[in-house]
Image: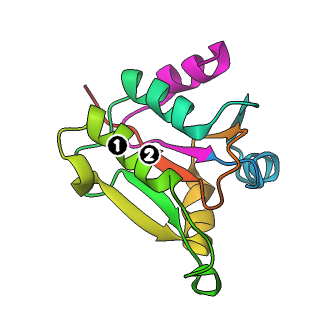
Amino acid sequence: MNPDLIKVIWEMGHGDKLVLADAYYPSASTAKRNGSILVRCDGVRNTEVLDAILQFMPLDTSVEKPALIMDLQDCDRGKVETPVWEEYKKIVCKYDPRGLDCIGMIERFAFYEAAKDAYAVVATGETSLYGCMILQKGTE
């Protein structure tokens, strides 16, 4: 957790979205194109950032799936392993009483579309393929 990320979380309101991006995601261009805030967390895994964020930011209870994980494209099914997804699920379940029920999967290009209205994009050093998430902020 760096000061920029803490500031962004506190600035966000109910329903605002935060993209938790892996090292391969076009974080800077997405933020620039969409008018989102870019927060750099280079060299840190998404699992560490997710765990830190959820200590301070509740997930939205007014939507069914406030935590969305980028899903595999059809061309990668059976070819790409995604063990980081299980780590994400464990972390979300630790902080949200809905457990797995509040986590959804979103196709890669639908993810890019959903990221267009994100308040901020957090660029990390996560090297797991398909290691991106969108978190929607709730209220405490």
> What is the quadrant of residue 114 in the picture?
bottom right
Asked if labels 1 and 2 touch by Cβ distance under 8 angstroms, the answer is: yes
> What is the quadrant of residue 104 in the picture?
bottom left
User: Residue at coordinates 51% horizontally, 56% vertically from top-left?
Assistant: 83
- Dot 2 crowding, Cα within 10 Å, few <14, some 14–19, many 20+: some
Give amino acid for label 2: Glu
Q: Compared with residue 6, is residue 137 higher up or lower down, i.e. above or below? A: below
Q: Secondary structure at mark 2?
A: helix
Q: Compared with residue 35, is residue 106 higher up or lower down, i.e. above or below? A: below
Task: Say which mark, if any, is on residue 87.
Answer: 2
Give amino acid for label 1: Lys
Q: Which residue is mark 1?
A: 90
Q: Pick whichever, 39 or 54, lies toward us.
A: 54
> What is the quadrant of residue 119 in the picture?
top right
Instruction: State which quarter of the image contains the N terminus.
Output: top right
Q: Secondary structure at mark 1?
A: helix
Left or right of 78, for residue 14: left
**Where residue 75 sits: x, y (%)?**
64, 86
**Where residue 110 sits: x, y (%)?**
55, 72
**Where residue 139 sits: x, y (%)?**
28, 30
Span colored in magenta: 1-20
Query: Does residue 36 belong to the magenta stretch?
Result: no
Let me know if residue 62 appears in the view.
no
Left or right of 140, for residue 50: right
Let me know if residue 32 appears in the view.
yes
